[in-house]
Image (tube, coloured by chain):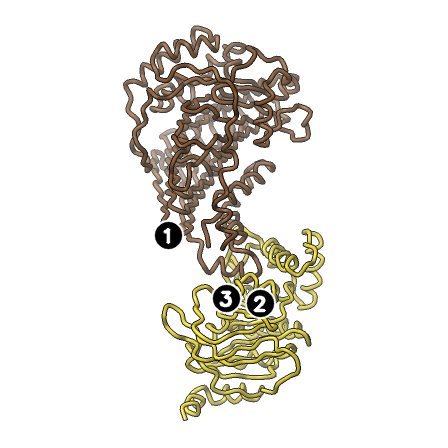
Chain colours: A brown, B yellow
Amino acid sequence: MTSIEAQVLQPYKYGFVTDIESDNVPAGLNEDIIRVISAKKREPAFMLEWRLKAFRHWVTMKEPTWANVKYPPIDYQTIVYYAAPRQAKSLDSLEQVDPKLIETFEKLGIPLAEQKRLSGVAVDAVFDSVSVATTFKATLAQQGIIFCPFSEAVRDHPDLIERYLGTVVPTNDNFFAALNSAVFTDGSFAYIPKGVRCPLELSTYFRINAAASGQFERTLIIADEGSYVSYLEGCSAPMRDANQLHAAVVELVALDDAQIKYSTVQNWYPGDTEGRGGIYNFVTKRGKCAGRNSKISWTQVETGSAITWKYPGCLLQGDNSIGEFYSVAVTNNRQQADTGTKMIHIGKNTRSTIVSKGISAGHGQNTYRGQVTILKGATGARNYSQCDSMLIGDQCGAHTFPYIDVRNSTATMEHEASTSKIGEDQIFYCRQRGLSAEDATSMIVNGFCKEVFRELPMEFAVEAQRLLGISLEGSVG
Amino acid sequence: MTAVTGTPMLEITNLHASVEGKEILRGIDLVVNAGEVHAIMGPNGSGKSTLAQVLAGHPAYTVTGGSIRYEGKDLLELDPEERAREGVFLAFQYPVAIRGITNAYFLRSALNAVRKHRGLPELDPLEFLDLLAEKLRSIESDDSLMNRPVNDGFSGGEKKRNEILQMAVLEPKLAILDETDSGLDIDALRTVAGAVDKLRRPDNATVVVTHYQRILNYITPDFVHVLSAGRIVLSGGKELALELEARGYDWVHAEAAV
């Protein structure tokens, strides 16, 4: 028992603050702030227009209230919309990055040194509002792959940005997406040319550091015909008493025969055991299978954030295209998660698979919300949904809201759902074989999540299992 | 029971235990020495399974009186996992399923927890497979269960076979079999009970909790005890089991009541 207590008291490991001088704009949001952000980023005129259009729409919108989460009203005028570590204007190599930043990412276990080739991962590191380093750019460029900070892509590849930005998540899609479109500051951009299989895992690591700042990043990944890319996303934030808003948008576009695999291990600061502080993670992620035989796979492991509101989905437009969603969402203490997916079947013979695992412990509230829509033209469409919830303790909750809308009679839909409780008998069985209660819990939970973990790239799967262990420490016993 | 020189492996004295406030065990006395096989028999509801669970330390059962000494230590002071690591093994009547975890992984984790406690090096997956192959041979079993999730979708016979396989690998000093024969057809019973018999050694002991005599055809007990209303009301040799089989339990109650 004492070892369990000791582990409960173990603080959030990534909660440190980096002491670095920051270039902030004043708090609050209006058209002038947007102009300042756009100017700081030296953006072309079309980008500023796009932002302003989004902002003008946003002011007419209302924050959504349908999610099964509770939080006090957010005052959008107290948020700082741009915070950047002060550093040399443009960076030609990693040597020019502030050592404090390199150190921060090393503390987080993110290698930014290019000689660490063995890890096989190209990293774009985003600190507060800006990308501070992107590794392996040159190696990737040899194959025509573009992997760079979003703001750089806006300047260097405006044609691609203008052509694809907002085509999957339009500026007026929802309240948080509109806000993001108006104020987003950076993020990652990747373009994989025709027929290229990206040789490295591309990865972005997001770090919120500045107090009172929001983080609004934008990611756009385009996989041209016949290409393949696997992309990883990680994140963390310091422990602060005030809640911080993170409203990101991710857009994926897969053309004919292209494949995108997008994996997330989300570990934003979840707040303390009483629910003070923590990140509001209000994120819009969507992929468009624009081409025939294309495939987009979302895999997410959500252990952090005070509140999670996200539904990574797929628009299955190309005939025979495939959408997948594999998710593990953990809520412990006072965390709330309302997460799931949207699969919109538009093309013929489109297929989607949804595997959702929700784990609730402490006073956590975990909601799965999923929408499967089969449109008229989607002849032969198929969906398989599996939605499992696990409860640890008797103060937590699990909720499931599946929405199904079928407008083509040739469609095949399967939905399975289960709720289980980690039973005393299960734990006792393991203990009787010599395993500690903590090891038993971690084993049972990992077994429960196995179908999702095996979709993760190897290094990430190990990270995810470890994270899950930490998130649930002390929830049994 | 005849006293044997040295400390008994297990010494239960005037044990009282209850579950959800209801007293089930009302003064059990039992001594088990290394090398012995004891059968605990009795009708349904007499407290047989409760005794097994209390020995293993199930948190739902509360010991309200008496003592249990195991190898001279106070067993009741130990957590369930500490008892397991010290060599107490319970073959469950209803083994639970663990989805997504293979039997091989589960068993290796358990074995390594036990080995660590005993100061032995932990086994890597390859070393474990070697050891497993040897254990499977010793009980004339195969590895067909090893890559399936723990007890998930197992038949009744497979579950019981799996319990005994775990017992073979973990090499307990004191094995408690809780109605291991229940739900087994005659062929499965022969396989499972035969495996238990092969694991008998002079330095370990087995307590067989059972309703029926038939498992004792394969595992010959040194002592048979009859449990009734939470007490041992009659003890004897292996012939007592046959008598119970022929006459039922009612006459024992009648004699005990005298």
> The numbered mark 1 sits on a residue in which chain?
A
Q: Chain of mark 3?
A: B
Name the amino acid type tagged 3: Gly
Left or right: B19 with respect to B76? left
Label 2 and label 1: CA atoms lie apart by 30 Å
Q: Vertical placement of A398 versus A103: above or below?
A: below
**Amino acid type, label 1:** Asp
Can you see residue B120?
yes
The location of residue B246, given as percent across then percent down, is 50, 89
Query: Foreground residue, A100 or B182?
Result: A100
Which residue is at a point 52% across and 21% down the rendered structure image?
Answer: A20
3 and 2 marks on the same chain: yes
Q: Which residue is mark 3?
A: B57
Which of the 4 image quadrants contains residue B167? Answer: bottom right
The x and y percentages for residue A275 are 38, 39
Residue at which label 2 appears: B89
